[in-house]
Structures are given as structure tokens and as C-alpha cells.
Amino acid sequence: MLSGLRAIATLPFNGDTRRGPRHSYIVSQLLGSGCQPMVDRHGNVWVEKGSGKKTILVSSHMDVDPRVHHLHFKAYTEKNRRMVSGVLDNAVGCYLNLRLAASTPRNARVIHVFTASEEIERDNPRRFCRSAREVVRELRSCGLAPDFCAVIDVTFPRILDPKGRIDWNKRYGDIFDLSDTTHCYLDGYSRRKEKELALSLMKRSKDPRIGLRYLHGHDEAYIYGRLCHAFAFGPVVYGDFATHDQRMPLAHLETAMRFLRKSLGY
């Protein structure tokens, strides 16, 4: 687990130029696990596994926030917890997506996508999540609408504001609950039907360490929501995602993997 996560987390990828060694590493890992990846003209990596009446899209972005430099990775123990630190957004999502793609789902067709550009120009809605827009256009051109989409990405701990608002002018510790013990959150949904889907998956998992919340923003789940039911899911990571000091207990990653395998039929 640690070697695979370390390899991704220490390799950069620029979502603007769409260049960086993380891309070739992901392709090589997919080939090594028996997959047949396809790279489209935008640099997005696609893999299809399994068959069945249900089609599921699983997406994770490869690029790193352009404000973050000097990627590093550290594994250590803190208060008897195995921890990792470094630039985990979204090395963790790519790692989980790779692990899933190495298996074959039992009763569904699963399309795994590693998107090239999510982070660039958050304040410019025409450019933010560019790759998710490209994926939606490609699927529409094929006449394909998945039953639902799961966007795998790291997420924040509990938001302290009672209405769930994030004021980025405040200090990190005044925005998020650093004592939150939730392992993962399922969020990013925008409609009642998506919430119902999320609730059904949570009930199936029977894991009290996974939380459900309405944390909806202009991200990849929002873009995929134009095509099908979509939500974001991922382990809780502590620390500013615009810095290299991001920390996660390994137990969060393990909980996320179990939930995804059960929810997606692996």
C-alpha cells in the first residue's frame, strides 16, 4: 500500500500543460495489472472493466494544485496511528482508482477515468474541471449515460460552520474540526435522487466511520452531474490542500477501499 501511494504522491503532473511523470506511471501500472488503458487526445486515461446492465463511471484527477511545489511523502506513527503526509490531493484518489481497476467487477460495467485537469483556475468556471467536461462530451458522443458516477478525491474533516459554509479567510483550525474522527465522507451531490443513492450505498456498507453531508461545489462531481447521478467520495485528509503538509491516517484509506469495493461490486 505505502509503496504505491508514495510513488504517485511524489510524481508531479501539471493540469495546464498536461505533462508530468505521474501520467506515465499510472498508465504503466494499469498495463502491469492486465488492463488495456486508452489515452484520449486531452491526456485523460480510460479503462473499462467488467460487463452487465449497470454502467458506473469512477473518476479521479491526476493533477496537483499548481500552488504546491516540492512533492514529498512521509510515513510515520502518531499516537499509535499509522499516518502519511505529503501532497495527497489527489494522489490518494488515483491510488484507490488504480487498485479498483486492477480487479474485475462482478455484475457491472465500470469505466475508470483518470482526468488530467481539475485543479487549474478554480475561479474561472470555463477552465476549472476541464477534463471532466471533456469526459462528459466524449460519453455523450458515444450515446452513453452511466447509471451513476463516483468521483474519488480526498476531502475535508467536519466543517465547523453550522450551515456548512467555508470561509477561506479564516484559519484552517477555525474552519474545520481537527478532532473529527470520521474516516470518509460521501458528499458533492446536488439533487435529492443523488442523496438517496448515497444513502443507499452507505446503508449497504454498514460502516459508521463513513459520513454523509451536503458539501456541494464547483468540482468534478458537479460536472458529471450534468450527465448522470454523481457524488464525491473520499477519505478525510487534514491540512491545507494548497500546501504540501497534508496528513491522513492510513485507516482512512483502508475504510475508503472497503466502501468502494462493496459499493461498486468488486
Image (cartoon, grey):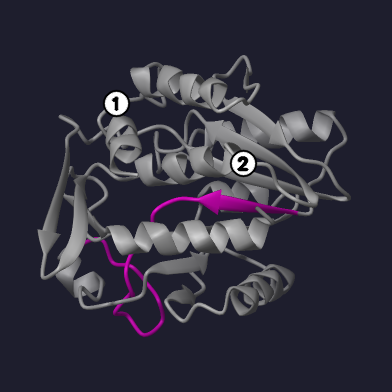
Instruction: Check if residue 258 falls in the magenta segment.
Output: no
Q: Is residue 5 above or below residue 153?
A: above
Secondary structure under tag 1 reads loop
Query: Which badge, 2 or 1, is on the more N-terminal residue?
Result: 1
* Residue that carries the numbered disc 1 in the rendered image: 11
Give the percent coordinates (x, y) of residue 181: 30, 77
**Which is in the foreground here, disc 2 or disc 1?**
2
- Under mark 2, the amino acid is Ser
* Residue that carries the numbered disc 2 in the rendered image: 103
Say how many tags the image has.
2
Q: State the residue in front, 18 or 260.
A: 260
Give the percent coordinates (x, y) of residue 21: 35, 18
Q: Specify the quadrant that holds the N terminus.
A: top left
Q: Residue at x 75, y 51 (%)?
A: 106
Instruction: Check if residue 158 falls in the magenta segment.
Output: yes
Q: Is residue 12 left or right of residue 203?
A: left
Give the percent coordinates (x, y) of residue 200: 68, 75
The reply to whether residue 192 is in sight is yes
Q: State the residue in front, 246 or 251.
A: 251
Q: Is residue 11 above or below residue 126?
A: above
Q: CA distance from mark 2 to mark 1?
A: 24 Å
Predominant SS along the magenta part: loop
Q: Do the residues under discs 2 and 1 have CB atoms within 8 angstroms?
A: no
Q: Is residue 29 above or below residue 157?
A: above
Q: Residue at x 33, y 68 (%)?
A: 166
Q: Which residues are magenta?
A: 148-169
Q: Which mark is residue 189?
A: none
Q: Is residue 31 above or below residue 150?
A: above
- Under mark 1, the amino acid is Leu
Q: Residue at x 35, y 63 (%)?
A: 252
Give the percent coordinates (x, y) of residue 22: 38, 24
Image quadrant where residue 13 sits: top left
